[in-house]
Amino acid sequence: MNASSARRYLPSHKTPHAKGHFKRPRHTGVSLVEVIVVVFILVILLALSIPFVRNMRELTRRSNCDQNLIRLGLAMQAYSTDSAHLPSGTASYNATFRFWPEVPSPAEPNADASPVDLAIVSEPEGYHHNWALASLPYVDQVGLSQSIDTTSSIYSESNRLIRETMIPVFRCPSDDSLPTNASYAGLHHSAANPISASNNGLMFLNGWVRPEEVPDGMSSTILFGEKLSFAGELGWCSGTRATLRNAGHAINAIPQSDQLENPSFVGGLGSRHFGGASVIKGDGAVTFISETIDQKLFQSMVNRNDQLVLASDAVISE
């Protein structure tokens, strides 16, 4: 190999500073500005999604609440099929019993009154077995139903286990009150009257109503509706304002403290769902009633004998 050939195989000794020999290294990291932009976009997306998630959760809870009402409606239909009448909204000692056995000694505060004049008060005195107790065999609570001491007041020691038991079907998923409170109430009257045997609803004192005794028809008369619990309520098995309400008040109306101090005060329907309350009619149909409904129209839907039959539900639901 000659000198010229050897020079061809020698490595080049270009200096690292020669112009154009090295490329500038490429930047592969993320800048602070880019991080801030991404975080900002994520925050905006999260803020936009929160109301949507809340609305979806509320729709789910409202749907579950309606399903509870449907189950209670089916329970009442099954009870009516077996007994040929609806259960009484509440019962007193001096009733002419169709379901509860008569017991020997009266315990109502005004027990000397006739069954027509007797009014139920929201105090733990009296018999007060209610529609919820009657529905237990039809909502998968046969064992609990069989443990009821029907010969004693619902407030007696023998019925303490019943009072302290929480029944899921009586609870709206959005209800954050005491677990032994009921989220639903039977409608006893169309006006703001005390609970008595002379009420015109489907669920009242000593009122075992037969379907043929409802001139307006079961499909036009409200049976149950959502309710808001008041302080000091006596629980889901008490046939007082704890499980009975009337149409004498606007839906979602909040009573005054002096009203709640009156044990004869009953109150109206209310809901933790926005804009109104769900009700179920005697035929099992669930309807959402706006809190802005005309009060007289609402009252006619509770009165079983006012001879007014609604032509369409469109006027009551928004």
Image (spheres, grey):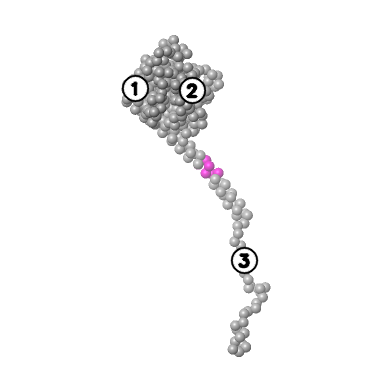
Q: In the depicted view, which residue is nearer to us: 318 or 46?
A: 46
Q: Can residue 240 be seen in this view?
A: no
Q: Which mark is residue 49?
A: none
Q: Where the N terminus falls, by quadrant?
A: bottom right
Residue type, label 2? Leu
Q: How far apart are marks 1 and 3 (CA)?
A: 89 Å
- Residue 275 placement (x, y as % from top left): 48, 31
Per the rendered image, the range of residues in magenta is 47-52
Residue linked to disc 1: 85
Mark 1 or 2 closer to N-term? 1
Position of 70 with respect to 55 (left or right) is left
Q: Residue at x 36, y 20 (%)?
A: 99
Q: Which residue is drawn at 38% across and 19% down?
A: 100
**Residue 97, quarter of the rendered image:** top left
Examine the residues drawn in magenta and state their main secondary structure.
Answer: helix
- Residue 256 placement (x, y as % from top left): 54, 22
The kind of secondary structure element at disc 1 is loop
